[in-house]
Image: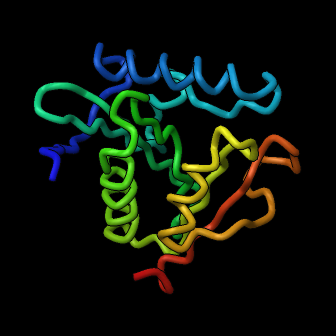
Amino acid sequence: MQDFQISPAHPGDPDAAHLIRSHVEQMAAQSPKESCHALDGNGLDSPAVAFFLLRNGCAAVAMGALKRLDDAAFELKSMHTLVEVRGSGAGRAMLEHLMDLARHDGATDIYLETGSTEYFKAARNLYESYGFVECAPFGDYVEDPWSTFMHLDLRAAS
């Protein structure tokens, strides 16, 4: 088992900024600009967003955020694990942390947008393994062939 620690962070912290930059660059390389919905540091520095870093020992290796949509719903944002530690369980640990946080805050629903291409298949598989199912665009999103929209009913999820 890895020695993961997850804690709140500010998007402007150097470790966070490094992960955010890596995430934004990878998303821009995978999707056309108009289909890239990754938040930069400014977008993550919002009262509606709770941002977290996952560390393995001293190294920040993953991040994730929850954006409040309304009293009962959150959007999962900025899930990113450094390429060199993918498969270590870091993404799974962050997802479980964010789901627990949403439950604690009284949420009944979590939504997310991820890519629809093969590059994002592992991410979609992870979400599906926790009960997320494909859904229609939510919030301000519109139908987009580059996007897959997913929803988790926290009342039904274990």
Residue located at (37% from left, 39% from top): 51
- The residue that appears at 81% across and 25% down in the rendered structure is 32
Left or right relative to 103: residue 58: left
Say whether residue 55 is left or right of residue 136.
left
Q: Considering the image in quadrants, where does the C terminus appear?
A: bottom left
Q: Where is 57 relative to 91, above or below?
A: above
In the rendered image, residue 25, in percent from the top left (x then y), is placed at 58, 17
Q: What colouring style does the render use?
A: rainbow
Q: Quick check: 17 above or below 131?
A: above
Q: Is residue 70 left or right of residue 31?
A: left
- The part of the image, by quadrant, that contains residue 118 is top right
Position of residue 144 measured from the top left corner of the image (x, y, whole percent): 87, 45
**Looking at the image, which residue is at 28% across and 32% down?**
9
Q: How many marks?
A: 0
Q: Quadrant of residue 87?
A: top left
Q: Is residue 99 left or right of residue 88?
A: right
Q: Position of residue 15 (x, y in %)?
A: 29, 19
Give how far across and how far down residue 107 sits, in percent: 46, 70
- 109 and 60: which is toward the camera: 60
